[in-house]
Image (cartoon, rainbow, N blue to C red):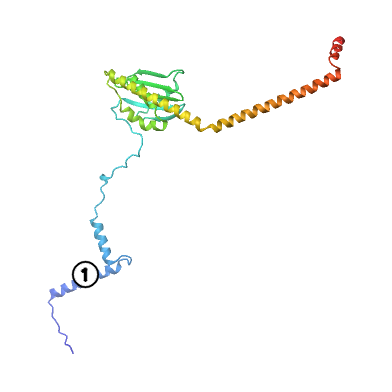
Amino acid sequence: MKQVQSVCLDPWQAQSRDRLLTQRQAADHRETQRPASLPRSSSAAHRIAAQRRPAPHLGSLSPPPPPWGSPRMLPASHPLLYACVFRDTHLVADLPTDADDLPPLAAALVAAAPPHHRYITHSAAGRAHALLLAPPLALAAVSRAPHLPAAQLLLFLRRLRCLPEDRMRDEMPRLAMRLPLPPDDEAALAREEHDVAAVEAEAEEAARRDAELAARRTPKRDHRGGAAAWAWRRQLWMVILVDLVLLAVLFAAWLAVCRGFSCIGRLLLYF
């Protein structure tokens, strides 16, 4: 039989032992209160990771880039203030601007354009205005007159007119960055006019080829139209022939009843 050896502890050791037992019981109580879905070791790891995870820095967040092909505004120092393209009365494309008075001004210029004019230029109040009429399109632009004169505005509109309508809005800023030309460089202005004329000739040739190709692709429609016209003419001739036959029958009956033209003489003698 084993003998139990009793150990006498001093008061300080007894207090330390009681404190350790109390802490161990409290830790066991916290462990039993944790959810059963998380393991004990993983809950402690998650808590430590959450404390060590740095908070997101709001200054590092930047807005998403604009979508590809979205229209861009020109720099504030650029002399071109506004440009737009109308098809009849419908706005096809325009250059973004912060000035609220420029879009109504350009629309008024297009609405007040006189007939039988190809282009109109005007300068007033430090601004240059250019209007290019190419029915059904009408192109207008406004600029600072001393820096971008109306003649260069007209070249800009002529080059813009050669583009497809679905590309005009995106190409406006790129074409505008070619301007202004040096005011005293006549050679640069002549080269620009030559380039614009070449672009216009190429666009007209492309339009002519497209029209010829479209005409070649639709021969059946022309054949159907010709067949319909021929059927209409055939029916017209049939109606005319029936009328002629009916008139001939009536004339023969009249001759038989009146015995030729003798009845006409008797009628004349009677009257």
Q: Is residue 257 shown left or right of residue 53?
A: right
Q: Is residue 97 visible?
A: no
Q: Tell which of 176 and 6 is nearer to you.
A: 176
Q: Tell which of 77 and 135 is nearer to you.
A: 135
What is the number of callouts on the image? Answer: 1
Residue 182 placement: quadrant? top left
Q: Tell which of 213 and 165 is nearer to you.
A: 213
Say if 166 sits above or below 56 in the image. Answer: above
Q: Residue at x 83, y 22 (%)?
A: 253
Q: Residue at x 27, y 64 (%)?
A: 42
Q: Which residue is mark 1?
A: 23
Q: Residue furthest bottom?
A: 1
Q: Residue at x 34, y 23 (%)?
A: 195
Residue 209: x, y in percent?
Answer: 44, 28
Residue 108: x, y in percent?
Answer: 42, 23
Task: Locate the C terminus by quadrant.
Answer: top right
Q: Amino acid at mark 1?
A: Gln
Residue 63: x, y in percent?
Answer: 31, 42
Residue 166: x, y in percent?
Answer: 41, 33
Task: Locate the N terminus by quadrant.
Answer: bottom left
What is the crowding at mark 1: few (fewer than 14 residues within 10 Å), some, or many (at least 20)?
few
Q: Tell which of 182 and 41 is nearer to you.
A: 182
Q: Is residue 49 visible?
A: yes
Q: Is residue 30 shown left or right of residue 220?
A: left
Residue 26 placement: quadrant? bottom left
Q: Label 1's element? A: helix
Say if 38 sits above or below 135 in the image. Answer: below
